[in-house]
Image (spheres, rainbow, N blue to C red):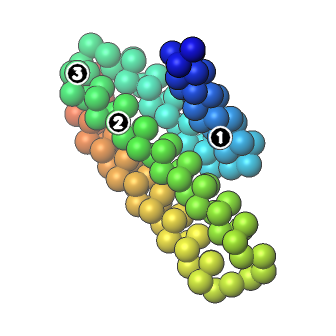
Amino acid sequence: MEKKKTKWTWLKKFAYAFRGLYFSLKEEASLIVHIVIAVIVLIIASLLHASMSSLDWVVIVLIIGMVIGMELLNTAIENLVDIVIFKYNYNAKKIKDISAAATLILTITSIIVGLIVFIPKIIVLFK
C-alpha cells in the first residue's frame, strides 16, 4: 500500500507543478514572450547544429531554463505580495520591482550568452 501512496504523491507533485505553469502562462504575457523566444533560439541552434558543440547546447538549454524559472519565481513573488498587501504599499512595490529586476538581469545575461555562442557560428556560416 505504501508504494502506491508514494507513486501517487509524486504524480500529484508533477500535476501541481504543471498546474502552476498553466496559471503562470494564463496571467503572465512576459512568460509567453520568454517561451516564444526560447523556441526561436532552439530553432536557430538546430539550424546551426553542425557547428554546435555539446557544451553550446548545455549552455543554451541551461540559460533558457534559468530565465523561464526566474520568470516563474517573479510571478510567484508578485502573487504573494498581492495576497499579503491589499492596497498600495511602497515596500510591496519595491519587492515587486526588485523581483522584476532580477528577471531583467538574467534576461540581459542570456542575450549576451546567446550572442557569444551564436555570433562566431553565424560568421563562419556566411564566410
Q: CA distance from mark 2 to mark 1?
A: 21 Å
State the residue at coordinates (57%, 14%): 1
- Sequence-wise first label, 2 or 1: 1
Q: Which mark is residue 62?
A: 2
- Residue type for callout 2: Leu
Task: List the single residue furthest toward the bottom.
Answer: 90
Going 78% across and 76% down the picture, which residue do you hit? 86
Crowdedness near tag 3: few (<14), some (14–19) or many (≥20) residues, C-alpha within 10 Å? few
Residue pictured at 38% horizontal, 47% vertical: 111
Image quarter for residue 105?
Answer: bottom left
Mark 1–mark 3 distance (CA, rounded to whole Å): 31 Å
Q: Which mark is residue 20?
A: 1
Q: Is residue 127 above or below residue 98?
A: above
Query: Compared with residue 55, is residue 109 higher up or lower down, i.e. above or below?
Result: below
Q: Is residue 69 left or right of residue 14?
A: left
Res 3 seen here: yes
- Name the residue beneath numbered marker 3: 54
Would you call the spot at circle 2 few (<14 residues within 10 Å), some (14-19), or many (20 or more)?
few
Residue 127 visible in the shown view: no
User: x, y (%) of residue 38?
Assistant: 49, 34
Earlier residue among tags 3 and 2? 3
Tell us which disc is closer to us: 3 or 2.
2
Badge 2 element? helix
The one of 114 and 35 positioned closer to us in this rendering: 35
Q: Position of residue 106 (x, y in %)?
A: 40, 54
Compared with residue 44, is residue 63 higher up or lower down, i.e. above or below? below
| Circle 1 residues within 10 Å: few <14, some 14–19, many ≥20 | some
Residue 52 lies, in percent from the top left, at 26, 21
Farthest residue to the front: give it: 1
Residue depth check, mark 2 versus mark 1: number of the one nearer the observer:
1
Tell us which disc is closer to us: 1 or 3. 1
Q: Earlier in the sequence, mark 1 or mark 3?
A: 1
